Image (tube, rainbow, N blue to C red):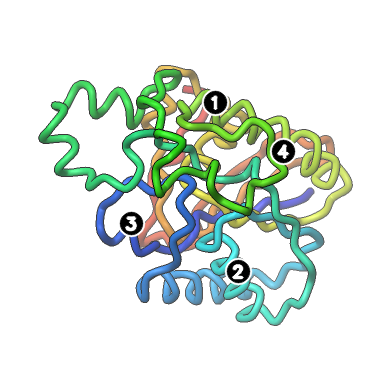
Amino acid sequence: MSKLIAIRHGQSIWNAENRFTGWVDVGLSDQGIEEAKISGELIKNLNLNFDVYFTSYLKRAINTLEIIMKVTKKKNKFIKAWQLNERHYGSLTGLNKAETKKKIGDKKFNTYRRSWNIPPPNLDKDSKYSSHQDKLYKDLKNIPSSESLKDTYERVVPYFEKNMLNQIKQRKNIILSAHGNTIRALGKKIFNISDENINLLEIPTGNPLVIEFDDTGNFKDAKYLDESRQKEIIFNK
């Protein structure tokens, strides 16, 4: 049996400002740093050995993982992958969520934010928030200008199947420090959630989600370590 601990990074500066972040590389807020420290303590208390560590290209996830590894006194190397980045929010990037909802209306706002396969309008490639201008992605050919959750799923899940699932079948324990929609996409696959209901899966910041697998890599169970901040985990729905 093996465990995958999937953790959404601690609160970021733009989370605190209620802004759509996506691929913009913002740092953790003071609260986010504390959430990462608490996550480290919760993981440390499991008394498990971890074999592999994964994160995205974005520093809020990287820094969360670094804090966790410091608290747990692990000095292992970790793997960074752009495929584990947050969903790209297109032209919504940088906008305040409450102001945007008021401007475009509830229906369109909810469609862009939580539908399965409808992305927001593209972000202009000349925008200061565009990843096309970011040196992090100079070797990436197909940089997105907007993504639906389906688009995010189609990069996250193949990466999981290629790079993590074999580790799980070898009974290795993994820590993944990533993003709300990264983990939502992965949860859709692992928990067998329908297109219609995936919007119901909420992923809180800085709360480790422990996912257990049997020796053949099949899902067994899942729980949040901080029960006071847990959200409902939906299965086969």
The Cα atoms of the two marked residues, 1 and 3, are separated by 22 Å
Residue 142: percent from the left, percent from the top?
Answer: 64, 30
Which one is closest to the eye, mark 3 or mark 2? 3
Q: Considering depth in this image, is 94 or 114 the residue closer to the camera?
A: 94
Pointer 2 or 4: first along the chain: 2
- Distance CA(mark 3)–CA(mark 2): 23 Å
Identify the element where label 4 is drawn: helix
Q: Which residue position is annotated with label 4? A: 160
Q: What residue do we see at 43% from left, 40% from top?
A: 126
Mark 3 vs mark 4, foreground winner is: 3
User: As shown in the figure, which amino acid type bears the numbered disc 2?
Assistant: Ile
Say which residue label 3 marks. Answer: 15
Residue holding disc 1: 151
Specify few, some or many for label 4: CA neighbours under 10 Å numbering under 14, 14-19, or 20 or more: some
* Residue 236: % across, % down: 52, 24
> Dot 3, crowdedness within 10 Å: few (<14), some or many (≥20)?
some
Q: Please say if 7 is above or below 69.
A: above
Of the numbered discs 3 and 4, the one sitting upstream in the chain is: 3
Of helix, strand and loop, which one carries label 2?
A: helix
Under mark 4, the amino acid is Phe
What amino acid type is highlighted by mark number 1?
Asp
